Image: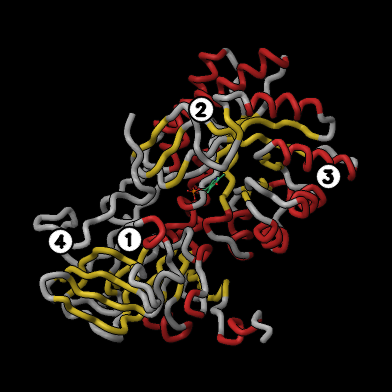
Amino acid sequence: MSRSAHPAGPRHADVLPEGHQLPVPDDLNVLDPKVWSATTERRADGVAAVGGIDVRDLAARFGTPLYVMDEDDLRARCRDWRAAFHNEEIDADVFYAGKAFLCRALVRWIADEGLNLDVCSGGELAVALSAGMDPARIGFHGNNKSTAEIERAVEVGVGRIIVDSFEEITRVAFAAERRGVTQKVMIRVTVGVEAHTHEFIATAHEDQKFGMSVADGTAAEAVRRIIKLSHLELLGLHSHIGSQIFDTSGFEVSARRVVGLLAQIRDEHGVQLPEIDLGGGLGIAYTGADDPKTPADIARELTAIVRRECDVADLRVPRLSVEPGRAIVGPSTFTLYEVGTVKPLPGLRTYVSVDGGMSDNIRTALYDAEYSVALVSRVSDAEPMLARVVGKHCESGDIVVRDAYLPADVTAGDLVAVPATGAYCRSMASNYNHVARPAVVAVKDGNARVIVRRETEEDLLRLDVG
Ligand SMILES: *Cc1c(COP(=O)(O)O)cnc(C)c1O
């Protein structure tokens, strides 16, 4: 059992020591397929392209910064997850976690590819419904859903509400009763496992706002209450242990505790709940050093874990669902920036300022997340230079890529791109410094279309009633 690690890896020292871990790449012009979306390529003229479109054309047509989403990559990932969890051996459901990134085009794509959808607010629900998502395929999460959100969810008939507190059990039951319907619910349980990156910790108590504890009996009490309420149907138990996880050992502990509770419920109430959901959190490659598992491996390992635990507890194997967010949308997208200034600090590093920053990618500042970056508007034979890619905000923590090598001749007007920004970048974007949020453009087969348009100055002023 290992110690806790930071969600996005250890913080680097301010100045990389001699012989630091960041390896100097052999060839800065190579776009590592580990971190770039499937159709991203370096063309013969040295310019990068994605979905058959030159990045210079994208910048010229849509401006920078720009989130560029590779639709083929995204759809292929949806299909891989679906196929991994839904085949001759495994019959499980994949819910895409909408909080990673949500817009109407994306909702249609994931629905098309056979995925269900998780939302965790009334706003996310509204986007899903507006895109025509079948409410029966939606799961509604959140530790403090408002009464209005619950009413709406029950009204439209969402497939499952994942209840997170005693108050919410009452609220959902009341909303269902008033409408004379039976609402399916799952209980979000905390299993005392917290997973970040490569490591997880298992503790006796859970010091966090989500869920109801298995260890202290709160979850079992929630079961007792729900079973008594005729307008609620208890589908099963739900556990989500963390994010950017690279191995299944945390899921193993979580599955054991969830299945343990299923057995306790069977013994106490004489019923076996039909479903369990093990949540999301599967990691992706942000840099060449990350090695995520394939969906097929994850599916095999998770189902093996659940089967084994059920065997031990002498339970029928429940229907399983999982909720990847980052793993589906993260690798599909890169952020395209234009370089504005280059400041060499002798003996330290070179600061490369781009035209976005913490408003379009807060993850570096918030989680010490690591990213990679490449010069994409041309190739270069210049020496590798230790760079820090920073934004344009009035804040020294406004870092996009803390440590990366760029060619030493990188200069104003160059386009650089940061891969793997599809998850938790646009969805967490802000208007800090009254910077307008970038557009999201989807590319496929030589076509590009805006799926979320760029904000304008007018948008920024719209809410300011003066
Ligand atoms: C955030 C979240 C997810 C998705 O996490 P990823 O790291 O994006 O896979 C899934 N389920 C729940 C309940 C979540 O809160």
- The kind of residue tagged 3 is Ala
Residue that numbered label 4 is attached to: 24
Q: What residue is shown at x 41% (from left), y 69% (from top)?
A: 358
Answer left or right for 432 relative to 14: right
Instruction: Name the N-terminal-most of marks 2 and 3.
Output: 3
Numbered mark located on residue 255 in the image: 2
Residue that numbered label 1 is attached to: 371
Instruction: Name the N-terminal-most of marks 1 and 3.
Output: 3
Q: Quadrant of the N terminus?
A: top left
Q: Secondary structure at mark 2?
A: helix
Q: Secondary structure at mark 3?
A: helix
Numbered mark located on residue 175 in the image: 3
Q: What residue is shown at x 43% (from left), y 31% (from top)?
A: 301
- The kind of residue tagged 1 is Tyr
Instruction: Name the N-terminal-most of marks 4 and 1.
Output: 4
- The kind of residue tagged 2 is Ala
* Gap between marks 2 and 1 measured at Cα: 31 Å
* Gap between marks 4 and 1 measured at Cα: 15 Å
Q: What residue is shown at x 54% (from left), y 35% (from top)?
A: 278
Badge 4 crowding class, 10 Å Cα cut-off, few under 14, some 14 to 19, many 20 or more, is some
